[in-house]
Amino acid sequence: MSRISFGYSVSEGKVINLDQQKPAWLEKIFELEPSLHRCISCGNCAAVCTAGHFTGMKFYRICLNAFRGQTSDLKNDAKACMLCGKCQFACPRGVNIRHAIMLMTQIQKP
Amino acid sequence: MHPFTIPFMAGFTMMFIVLIIRYSNWFRGFSTENRKRIAGRMFTRRSIHALNEIFRESLLHLKIYKTNPILGYMHMSLAFGWFLLIVGGKLETWYYTGNFANPPQYAIFFRFFHPVTEATGIHRIIDFYMEFSLLVVLSGLTIAMVKRIRKQVAGMKNTTRHTLTNRLALTFLWFIFPLRLLAESATTSIHGGGSFLTGITSGLPFHPAVELPLWWAYSISLGVFFVCLPFSRYLHIPTEMITILLKKWGVEPELKLKTNKGLQAFEIHSCSGCGICLDACPAIGVGDKKFQSVYFINEMRNGKDHSKTAELCLSCGSCQQACPVGIQLEPLRISARENLNSEMRFNHTYLPSKMILWRETTDVILFTGCMGRMNPRTTQSMKKLFDEAGIGYVHADEDENICCGRPMVLTGASEQAELMMSRNRDIIHSYNAKVLVTTCPICYKQFKNSYKLNIPVVHHSMYINQLMEEGKLNRHHSNLNFSYHDPCELGRAFDCYEAPREVLKRAGHVVALSKEKEKSLCCGNNMGTILLERENRQQITDKTLMVLSENNPDYIVTSCPVCKNTLSQQSSIPVRDIAEVLTDLPEIKQKTGERLTAMRESHIN
Ligand code: SF4
Ligand code: SF4
Ligand code: SF4
Ligand code: SF4
């Protein structure tokens, strides 16, 4: 039986695929900085971000994408950070954002 | 020589050989510049200053004495008492043999070889001196034993734990002097002689057969202690003295931290494990992992993983200030972080470079930094104050700001902060100004120490104080009580304690606190920490607020945006920046048309 086409499709990014395993290095980052699990993508971190003023870098995006296994831009985005720490003041969930970013810039592969 | 001296001689020789091997390894790690420094300064006055410091700190332990008199006495009596015994032994044997270069074991076991019986003047004096010195050592030892058993006696809340070699060395160190007393007493009771101390103890019923075994036991405990010394924390005794010399000769830390190389090796092994850094640390008892300096140094010394102890610390500088040995703990930690995070890569090439077409001339460049953006009230107050004093200013990072780079330096990525720094430098140099005023102590430290700017840098508390002294700003004295929180990066880092207090004293009363100035606690959010959890940071903030709330002040005042944000989130007492105090508090009123002298008088009254 073929599918009926309604003329639109679900784009990849909007699918949450629970079968997909997080890559080992990503698991490692979550293990070394478990506070990442607390992120609720509220966006406060991006609102105050010093680096975000110059680039499109948004920490909540990095985090959200990492949860979804989308990691292609992760390292490059993280590299823009200046470690100024404003985001940590704004974060309502006490995420150790600077440490998470420090770990992300160190990953070998992507 | 009698065979019972062999254990001592063997142990002493072994210690000597091991020390020479270890030290020459560390010496080999010195850079060429450092070698030149040593060679050029060895025969200058610096060495005499070093000897003076060695006498004051390695023997008398004056710094520990100032922090904690009982602990100081303990260290002093052990080190200085032993020193008195060594000097006395040398003089004694020289006097009796007429030969200065007699072997050390002759002096150490002198009473056995020469149980003095003549009771003439000089002998009496020598005997009295030797036994008095022994008594001094024994009194220190008693405190040490009591301290181990009941650590509160010496006033220390926290004592360090010990590894096996440390325990072995400690046990035999404890045996040495009581055994010496027993052996000398036995000899005295059999052959006569002695002074006030053995005069009492020789009354014990010593059988002639125990004399020699006691001397053997004394010799063995000395021998074992010396064998253990280079592998235990007692290595700090000789190492500390060499470190003092090296520092006086201007030796700098090597660029890359290795625990067996250069000045860092000497510093790490100079730590006596005294534990004074524990009581100084604002984070003591916070979190599961103890990361205070003594643990950090111990891990490095033993080649263990020190990532946690290096990265949890807040870099508040409290322990470095308190350390009686003067170990440069913050640079050590930052170098350790450099090694740990060497894979970290940042890229700030996106930062726009500044085109300078025309250099605006003004009095002051105001730089408020990243954290200043979260505290716009402080910035507005500063601008009001500039206007009031008739000072022209530009706000360099009003529209967009680039981090000063210090947070990055603190994580061990100092090289990667260079681009940010050079962009900021260009911005600052694009104005013709007399001075750079920053409202953030973190920026202040970075600008002052690493930027090499063409104008002086001052912190806003210093600048306000200066304006008040010049009479350009003045305030009526109010009845408000302020408690002032010293930011780590301004207080301990620059000894800037008086300028902000002077400002506050002109506007109200500054209450005294149980921990302030160099002893002030960290607000809990120092940029220095990488790993500390928020809950733990909040615990520190609570402790700090307890101190700041003593005497119920009307306002808690500070001069750092990080401290202000952190404290105000948990404080029931309002927290203000020092600039806001002068502009925003309704109780504080501007004096109009009055000159400096009038203001000074009201201040004195
Ligand atoms: S501020 Fe904190 S909780 Fe909010 S998105 Fe950023 S990291 Fe997540
Ligand atoms: S530390 Fe990095 S992510 Fe956080 S606000 Fe600063 S630049 Fe942005
Ligand atoms: S680091 Fe300094 S204060 Fe701490 S235990 Fe060592 S010598 Fe004592
Ligand atoms: S720098 Fe401060 S937080 Fe770190 S160990 Fe020393 S006293 Fe504790």
Image (cartoon, rainbow, N blue to C red):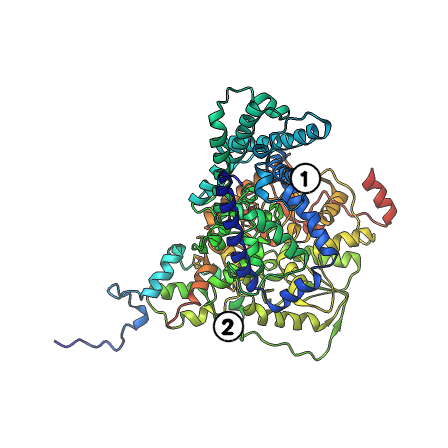
Q: How far apart are marks 1 and 2 (CA)?
A: 67 Å
Q: How crowded is mark 2: few (under 14 residues within 10 Å), some or many (20 or more)?
A: some
Query: Residue at image x 72%, y 30%?
Result: B122
Task: Answer yes or no: are tags 1 and 2 on the same subunit.
Answer: yes
Figure quadrant of the N terminus of chain A: bottom left
Give SS at disc 2: loop
- Residue B334 image position (x, y, % from top left): 54, 59
User: In which quadrant of the rendered view does residue A35 lie?
Assistant: bottom left
Left or right: A74 in relation to B92: left
Of the two numbered discs 1 and 2 in the rendering, the one whose residue sits closer to the viewer: 1
Looking at the image, which residue is at 42% across and 43% down?
Answer: B164
Tag 1, which secondary structure?
helix
Position of residue B498 relative to residue B25, above or below, is above
Identified by mark 2, the residue type is Asn
User: What residue is at 68 percent from the left and 25 percent from the top?
Assistant: B119
* Residue carrying label 1: B91
Asked whether mark 2 lies closer than 8 Å to ligand 2, one says no
Query: Considering depth in this image, is B150 or A67 the residue closer to the camera?
Result: B150
Which numbered circle lies on residue B347? 2
In the picture, the quarter occupied by the C terminus of chain A is bottom left
In contact (CB < 8 Å): disc 1 and disc 2: no
Q: At which x and y percent is residue A7? A: 25, 78
Q: Is residue B314 left or right of residue B165?
A: right
Is residue B536 visible in the rendered image? The answer is yes
The answer to whether B501 appears left or right of B25 in the picture is right
Placement of B161 over or under B32, stated as above or below: above
Residue B146 vs residue B45: left or right?
Answer: left
Residue B335 image point, x, y percent = 54, 61
